Amino acid sequence: MNNLMLDLETMDSKPTSAITSIGAVFFNPETGEMGETFYRRVSLESSVAHGCSVGADTVLWWMRQSSEARSELLSDDSHGLDTAIEDLHYFITSQTDAGSLQVWGNGAAFDNVILRHAAEKTGLFSTMWNFWNDRDVRTIVQLSKTLGLNVNNIIKFEGTKHHALYDAIHQAKIVSYVWMYLVKIASVK
């Protein structure tokens, strides 16, 4: 599989945001098959020490989320930003060729951009994936609305919302559903 759905939980909405967790799942959008998963909690202190930002609006937003989601931010089982990114790099390269990897994030200027910034801050990004292989979930969701699909009713969320791994899996299911729907429409014509 060479499609990777990435989701981050962060403490800002800027490209420089501090990361508090990284979730990822390999998937095949043509079949909906889910592959290997990755999840790391990231120490907020480590993210900030690497020059990543915290925004008051995002902190306030987190305070309004479920206790399950907030508990992930406070877990003692967190890794340094550099270790989490090294682990993600190993996860990616042990599964596929980085040159053909297509990395999906929820927003053209969010997950992928934030992770790239954090990885550059730690000096670890150079071989993770090629920028031209960035893919955007929000574009697929908008396309589904144009097609008359309500993917939020069709694909039920499983797990805790705003948990990076559960969010990544849910987003991969959405992309796969819309992808297969479009292929089916194209094959009928």
Image: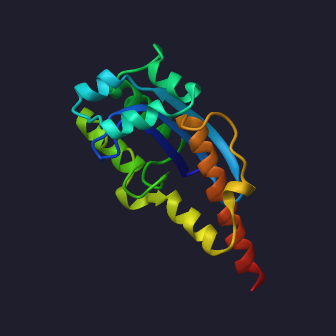
Counting from the top left corner in percent of width and height, residue 63 is at 45, 30
Is residue 104 shown left or right of residue 156? left
Counting from the top left corner in percent of width and height, residue 87 is at 44, 29
Is residue 30 shown left or right of residue 110? right
| Residue occupying the point 62% across, 33% down | 160
Q: Is residue 183 visible?
A: yes
Residue 106 to residue 85: above or below:
below
Relative depth, front residue between 188 and 44: 44
Counting from the top left corner in percent of width and height, residue 47 is at 30, 28
Residue 107 to residue 14: above or below:
below
| Residue occupying the point 70% across, 39% down | 158
Is residue 88 shown left or right of residue 150? left
Counting from the top left corner in percent of width and height, residue 1 is at 60, 50
For residue 126, what is the image quadrant? top left
Q: Is residue 126 visible?
A: no
Q: Residue furthest top?
A: 76
| Residue occupying the point 48% across, 40% down | 92
Relative depth, front residue between 73 and 117: 73
| Residue occupying the point 45% across, 39% down | 8
Q: Residue furthest right?
A: 188
Q: Which part of the image, by quadrant, shows the C terminus?
A: bottom right
Relative depth, front residue between 172 and 95: 172
Relative depth, front residue between 149 and 136: 149
